[in-house]
């Protein structure tokens, strides 16, 4: 195999910057240089899951919708908790007015709700939704009704997400019962056809974790996310059981009439973050993030992340104050934010300081009682477009946390909890930090899947103090270790990176052999596997090399060591590839295949425009909702049809594709990188999708 690093150039830009004063870290006092196991043991002895659980319980009392009085109260509670522990903390507030943007993220208006209820009056009178009982009984960000609403209930075909679902139905002046996307149904039923509002009765179904009917008496967290110029509306949320009762009556031809009211408002207010700081000796910093938002109670998602972060901060600060740990070289900062919107605002506020942010860690849904929720404690790595040593450090600490249970006569090696290490996944604040245009490597720790995610059943009894203790200890160790790491720790970090990359190479080679080793081997199929392995090894080795180079962010004098280790890894990849080819040849020979020719790869016709080079006109990941709203209705429908045609949900390949978009790569090259990173891509989709980004004014397409 050709030398991976020399023949493949993936990274054309480096985000490594070395601030003045760090050219020679060896001058720093050795007081900083505790390897992570020493730090872990000290913090493990101090961290309390019960203390963290107390914070989770307090935060869960607040109705924490992003930009609302409830989340402000929760932030103020957290700030006071930090201060009680002697930690500097304050509220960061940003105007929430439906006008200001943080990069591509629109700061929506503040919302509050005082009262809401809904009851059936025909065929019988019965309350079916009361905000005083469950805050999720309202579609969040609903506006007020005009007094008390008296209306007939009607259910469109299917979910009411398509125009044909309303054929033969008159919804004007009625309330529409739906389990579909509330924005889509609001547009079709309320805006286009004159319905009064919505009644939502949907619930998640996740095979293997949450079966249909398991949460029949819970409510699904549902919200409007308005854009400037939208026709605003309102709606209530029912349990699936109640919704099914209404649907049964409607199906029997009975008239279902309801009465209800909502007292709520949207207004110019503030978006709030709680920020706490353990000051270091320099202006560099490590950040721990936990979003503090979501409806009452939302105990695991994500009062648990906020509670774990507070306890991690308390433990670090306590050990510094009593002299067990030294004051960190770098500042450690804890940000409790409205998910994603708060991180956008915080990073824009401190945009000039971003180069000083060495690393971050996102805690999202971390406190689960695994026996109740069915969850697995997972660490997601940074994307391949931002390779970093932090993944190896996070994994090493994670492995230490798993050493709980001993076999006979051995040291503890086994965990009492389910755990896994996974590749990058978006969906929370880490994906903003880890965007290459931001350049702050940020893994995420999460418990997933969680049976009670985004429902009224996400209550404090589903939270485990043991999980909180583990996570707080891991996060505190990560933050404190990286707040001090430099030239002394760098060789250990480098060894962690290369050893884990070698394991990944072995796994890839064996998986490829397993796929090709069938009872009826075909030379063409084997050649495809062989070609894929060659290209994937080249790609993975380049990603690993960039992760090695990222150590220079901590230790600028590591050039020689890093260069030698990269060369070693390249040689190792070559040897493993040769090993795989030999095994495949031997397997083929056993089936009478004398040789494995190197066939010409199949030439695929690429869609028109695949050769274009996109240039992003914004920083950070794309918050597309307000930008899609600026398209014409025809274009919005076309974009929706595109996503539906290709089965795209949650952005599909677009998040990774935009990460790889650096103004030098063509869409074809970007698509191939997405495939090498994730195992799948869709070039046809990406070409069309980027066309819509051009219409939104977010991307320019050029030629080489």
Image: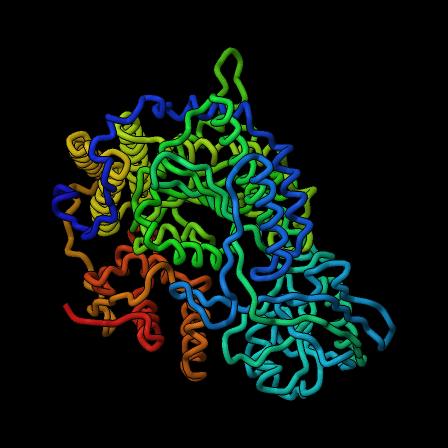
Q: Residue at x 43, y 53 (%)?
A: 426
Is 342 located above or below residue 596 in the figure?
A: below
Can you tell which quarter of the image residue 306 is in?
A: top right
Query: Residue 118 location in percent, x, y?
Result: 77, 71
Report whether 631 appears left or right of 155. Answer: left
**Would you say residue 418 is visible in this rendering?**
no
Locate the N terminus by quadrant.
Answer: top left
The front one of 649 and 75 is: 75
Query: Residue 529 location in percent, x, y?
Result: 26, 47
Q: Residue furthest top?
A: 409
Can you tell which quarter of the image residue 521 is in?
A: top left
Q: Residue at x 46, y 62 (%)?
A: 650
Locate the C terminus by quadrant.
Answer: bottom left
Q: Residue at x 61, y 73 (%)?
A: 159
Query: Residue 107 location in percent, x, y?
Result: 48, 66
The front one of 367 and 30 is: 30
Is 248 located above or below residue 398 in the figure?
A: below
Query: Residue 444 location in percent, x, y?
Result: 45, 45
Total count of labels? 0
The front one of 585 and 197 is: 197
Q: Residue at x 24, y 26 (%)?
A: 27
Can you tell which quarter of the image residue 373 is in?
A: top right
**Would you say residue 630 is visible in this rendering?**
yes
Is 259 located above or below residue 70 in the figure?
A: below
The front one of 374 and 10 is: 10
Report whether 361 appears left or right of 450. Answer: left
């Amino acid at each position: 195999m050709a030398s991976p690093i020399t023949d493949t150039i993936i990274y054309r830009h480096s985000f490594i910057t070395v601030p003045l004063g760090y050219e020679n870290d060896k001058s720093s006092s050795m007081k900083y240089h505790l390897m992570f196991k020493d730090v872990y043991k000290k913090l493990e002895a101090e961290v309390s899951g019960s203390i963290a659980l107390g914070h989770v319980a307090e935060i869960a009392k607040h109705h924490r919708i992003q930009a609302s009085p409830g989340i402000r109260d929760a932030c103020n509670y957290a700030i006071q908790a930090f201060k009680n522990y002697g930690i500097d903390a304050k509220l960061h507030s940003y105007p929430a007015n439906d006008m200001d943007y943080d990069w591509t993220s629109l700061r929506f208006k503040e919302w509050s709700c005082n009262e809401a209820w809904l009851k059936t009056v025909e065929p019988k009178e019965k309350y079916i939704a009361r905000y005083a009982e469950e805050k999720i009984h309202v579609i969040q960000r609903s506006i007020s009704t005009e007094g008390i609403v008296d209306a007939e209930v009607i259910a469109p075909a299917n979910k009411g997400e398509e125009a044909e679902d309303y054929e033969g139905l008159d919804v004007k002046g009625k309330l529409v019962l739906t389990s579909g996307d509330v924005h889509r149904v609001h547009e079709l039923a309320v805006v286009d056809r004159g319905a009064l509002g919505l009644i939502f009765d949907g619930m998640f179904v996740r095979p293997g974790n949450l079966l249909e009917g398991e949460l029949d008496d819970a409510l699904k967290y549902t919200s409007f996310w308005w854009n400037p110029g939208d026709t605003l509306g309102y709606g209530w949320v029912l349990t699936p059981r109640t919704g099914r009762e209404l649907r049964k009556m409607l199906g029997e031809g009975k008239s279902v009439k309801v009465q209800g009211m909502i007292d709520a408002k949207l207004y110019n207010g503030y978006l709030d973050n709680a920020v706490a700081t353990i000051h270091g000796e320099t202006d560099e910093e490590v950040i721990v993030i936990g979003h503090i938002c979501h409806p009452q109670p939302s105990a695991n998602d994500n009062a648990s992340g906020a509670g774990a972060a507070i306890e991690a901060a308390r433990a670090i600060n306590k050990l510094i104050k009593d002299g067990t740990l030294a004051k960190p070289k770098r500042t450690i900062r804890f940000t409790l934010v409205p998910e994603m919107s708060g991180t956008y605002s915080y990073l824009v506020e401190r945009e000039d300081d971003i180069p000083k942010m060495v690393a971050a860690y996102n805690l999202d849904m971390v406190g689960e009682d695994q026996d109740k929720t069915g969850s697995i404690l997972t660490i997601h790595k940074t994307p391949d477009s931002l390779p970093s040593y932090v993944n190896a450090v996070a994994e090493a600490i994670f492995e230490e946390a798993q050493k709980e249970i001993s076999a006979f006569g051995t040291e503890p090696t086994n965990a009492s909890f389910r755990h896994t290490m996974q590749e990058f996944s978006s969906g929370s604040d880490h994906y903003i930090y880890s965007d290459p245009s931001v350049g702050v490597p940020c893994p995420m720790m999460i418990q997933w899947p969680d049976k009670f995610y985004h429902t009224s059943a996400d209550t404090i009894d589903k939270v485990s103090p043991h999980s909180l203790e583990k996570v707080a200890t891991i996060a505190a160790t990560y933050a404190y270790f990286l707040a001090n790491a430099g030239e002394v720790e760098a060789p250990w970090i480098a060894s962690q990176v290369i050893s884990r990359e070698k394991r990944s190479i072995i796994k890839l080679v064996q998986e490829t052999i397993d796929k090709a080793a069938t009872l009826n081997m075909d030379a063409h199929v084997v050649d495809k596997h062989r070609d894929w392995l060659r290209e994937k090894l080249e790609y993975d080795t380049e990603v690993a090399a960039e992760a090695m180079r990222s150590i220079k962010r901590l230790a600028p004098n590591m050039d020689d060591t890093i260069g030698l280790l990269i060369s070693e890894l390249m040689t190792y990849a070559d040897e493993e590839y040769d090993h795989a080819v030999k095994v495949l040849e031997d397997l083929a020979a056993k089936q009478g295949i004398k040789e494995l020719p190197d066939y010409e790869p199949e030439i695929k016709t690429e869609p028109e425009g695949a050769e274009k080079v996109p240039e992003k006109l914004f920083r950070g990941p794309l918050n597309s909702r307000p930008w899609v709203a600026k398209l014409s209705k025809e274009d919005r429908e076309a974009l929706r049809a595109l996503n539906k045609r290709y089965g795209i949900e949650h952005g599909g390949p677009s998040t990774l594709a935009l990460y790889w978009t650096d103004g030098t790569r063509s869409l074809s090259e970007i698509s191939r990188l997405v495939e090498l990173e994730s195992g799948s891509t869709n070039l046809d989709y990406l070409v069309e999708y980027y066309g819509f980004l051009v219409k939104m004014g977010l991307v320019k397409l050029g030629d080489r």
